[in-house]
Image (cartoon, rainbow, N blue to C red):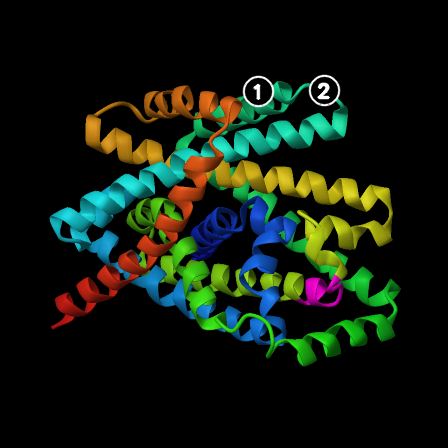
Amino acid sequence: MGDILGNNFLNIFKVASIFIGTVVGAGLASGKEIYQFFSIYGLKSFFGFIICFFIYIFIGNMICNISHKKNLSSYNLLISEICPKFPARVLNIFTSLYYLFSSSIIFAASGSIISQFFSVHKIYGIILMILVTLIVLKFSMKGLFLVNAISVPIMIFIIFIMFLMFEIFSDPINIQTSIVNNLENEIRIHNNIILSSFLYGGFNILSASGVLAPLSTENTKKNFKNGILIGSFFLVLISLIINYLILSNMPYIAQYDIPLLYISKIFGKSFQIIILILIWIEMLSTETSSLYSLARSISNKFGHSFFKSVLIILSVSIPISIFGFSKLISVIYPIFGFLSFVFMFYVIKYRFKKNK
């Protein structure tokens, strides 16, 4: 009995941690994504996270049911199952490109962080990320789980500590002033919080489909659904905390690329270093998830071994990270954001069609 409960807990934790780690990435951990998709809408932004919560749970569970029933072990098999031939081809191409360029972005970002932190050439940061990623993916899903089992609890703990320290050491009057200003200005600024929330939630659930599909085939439906529920809860919780911290520092924080780094400066240099390390670890988590998802797809389609598929991807993504690709990213990412709506539509349509 104890072994069964222990295995159930481990499997639930596995799903939750990998889901959180895949979605978080450097963008959410730094606060930049939260600012761009939510904080700019003022106090209405808190409502947006409720929308994301339900997207994660309902679409995540639908992916589980479809993948579990059809034994789908990669995102390309999932997309091909739920979509007609042409939409499936388009979705698969752009999802693959998204994973490829996400991988390249993270290599480049790792190079920049290590370069700034240690005053060395950025190539050392790229090499470090490559080596750690290869070590992790050598163990496939086990390696992916290990990275997230370590990084996700640490990230949640640090963000909670940051929230508590901010509440203790910050001036309540300044916080109230920032929040009141948001309340007064929110009607005059952006007014598309619902669209932004669906875009953010859909973007994340499509990018996470590459790990959710194989995870669903390795777990019971109950464990998977509990994992998605717990993962969604903590994702929304840390997002709410980060959003609160950003709103409490408006409008000064708007000009910073790493909002949490700006907030952490009131706690001293040591805490800023901790935030930078956290961002790098979350970059690693997203890097391994992206490469894992794309490698599983290539492995299924062309019959290569998983690790050989990883090496093939790296042979393409590493040169891109060195030589730059800003124009490609500006085209690929908006298209991927739009296609996330298409993906959710076909998931829902497929699920309800099969239930008739």
Image position of 301 with respect to 267: above or below: above
Q: Earlier in the sequence, mark 2 or mark 1?
A: 2
- In screen coordinates, is 234 left or right of 176? left
Placement of the C terminus among the 4 image quadrants: bottom left
Horizontal and vertical percent position of residue 303: 21, 25
Looking at the rendering, which quadrant does residue 82 occupy? bottom left
Q: Which segment did they paint magenta?
A: 244-251
Q: Which residue is mark 2?
A: 120
Amino acid residing under circle 2: Val
Amino acid residing under circle 1: Ile
SS assignment at label 2:
loop
Horizontal and vertical percent position of residue 290: 42, 38
- In screen coordinates, is 116 left or right of 300? right
Which residue sits at x=52%, y=69%?
49
The number of numbered badges drawn on the structure is 2
How many other residues sit within 10 Å of disc 2, few (<14), some (14-19) or many (≥20)? some
**Residue 109 or residue 54, whichever sits in front:** 109
Which residue sits at x=32%, y=51%?
216
SS assignment at label 1:
helix
Q: Which residue is mark 1?
A: 127
